[in-house]
Amino acid sequence: MTSNQQDIKTFAFRTKAMLSMMELKVQSAREQESINWHLASHGVPKSLHCLCLKLAEEYAVNAMARSHLPPPEYVSRLTDPSFHHVVLLTDNVLAASVVISSTVQHSANPEKLVFHIVTDKKTYIPMNAWFAINPIKSAAVEVKGLHQYDWSHEVNVHVKEMLEIHRLIWSHYNDNLRNANFQHEGVNRRSLEALTPSCLSLLNHLRIYIPELFPDLNKIVFLDEDVVVQHDMSSLWELDLNKKVVGAVVDSWCGDNCCPGKKYKDYLNFSYPIISSNFDHDRCVWLYGVNVFDLEAWRRVKITTNYHKWLKHNLNFGMELWQPGVHPPALLAFEGQVHPIDPSWHVGGLGYRPPQAHNIKMLGDAAVLHFSGPAKPWLDIGFPELRSLWNRHVNFSDKFIRKCRILG
């Protein structure tokens, strides 16, 4: 400008072009970071893979590791309604050990606890080996593989149908992602959700079949694998659900007009009348992670049948009614059957972001911390300031933990 080699108009044009190019580069870097973060969150760490292999070896050579769980003296507790039944559906041995260890440690009456771990066939051996050679004092632990269930032909058909529909939804959104122009149109985050393993996980989807998994139980507490229990949970089993099916956190610990999770509009497609005429887009969703289920009421109002009805609706509407995942169809199936519980029972989203400084006290007060989100505490991308809350329940002196170099 000062050397008179270009006029103001040319200078402004070139400056604008430079800024636009810089914005594109920043946008592209953010999109690539999002994809890298997404991929990093779905890998199985070598250390966890090693743990399963070492435990499988132990199962083969150590008779104690092959012990049937629970021991004979605890078998009668498995269907006794006077005990407190906790259900986990997981293929992560280390995570399951943390959930159970933290629950027992903070329980006022650990002898009342009965843990039911349901896992897949490949994880059954290492899971059984871990809890057989690391018995939980007082509490009963049952480990059962899906291959050990003898379901009716009708249930098997419905499960296969459910998985096939979820697979189609996954494929639909995966195709949308492949067709997205990452460089200039941005990452289609809604489609990116379709790549999460949980969208195709049999164990994840089978939570809608909990009444079939436990036909002799009428009330259970369900815990996700990525939680840490910090307080006694006995009162959850005594909670009156007012004839509703599920007790869950709905209201927020973060203040007025703030949802602890997301809103219905974040999961459902309100451009379709079948959704917009039946649901409030601005309503907070209830949270999975720590839930009380009245299985008797579940069977009575036919929640699972309603779930399948919505799956077929989604299929008929071109798989556009909701985002991929377990939660959206559950929101529809459990509509009108949710009893809100106190927000202090469950603080979630700790795998999405670390808490702000003013929320640190909230973490200490919460009964259950839920590391929902990609940054699981057993992954390298887990937040260092939160990982210690999970690591304190890992037995780092265990020989298998040390052999596999699982570090805190």
Image (cartoon, rainbow, N blue to C red):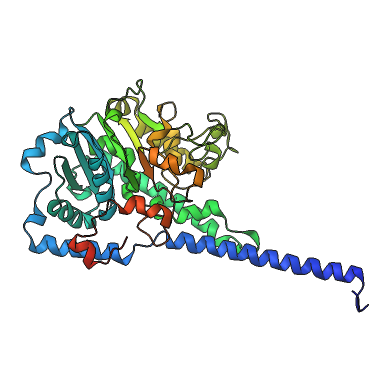
Where does residue 245 sit, x and y in percent of width and height?
Answer: 35, 27
The quarter of the rendered structure image containing the C terminus is bottom left
Residue name at image x 39 percent, y 51 percent: 198
Residue name at image x 61 percent, y 62 percent: 181
Q: Is residue 304 visible?
A: yes
In this view, 359 is above or below 190 = above
In this view, 121 is above or below 118 = below
Where does residue 287 sit, x and y in percent of width and height?
Answer: 42, 38
Q: Which residue is nearer to you in this view: 393 or 86?
A: 393
Residue name at image x 38 percent, y 60 percent: 379
Q: Which residue is nearer to you in this view: 227 or 294?
A: 227
The quarter of the rendered structure image containing the N terminus is bottom right
Where does residue 183 sit, x and y in percent of width and height?
Answer: 63, 65
How many marks are shown on the rendered structure? 0
Where does residue 121 sit, x and y in percent of width and height?
Answer: 22, 54
Q: Is residue 201 visible?
A: no
Q: Which residue is nearer to you in this view: 95 or 272?
A: 95
Q: Is residue 189 left or right of residue 295?
A: right
Residue name at image x 45 percent, y 56 percent: 195
Q: Quadrant of residue 21?
A: bottom right
Q: Is residue 303 left or right of residue 51?
A: right
Q: Quadrant of residue 209?
A: top left
Q: Is residue 116 left or right of residue 226?
A: left
In this view, 294 is above or below 139 = above
Q: Is residue 69 left or right of residue 241?
A: left
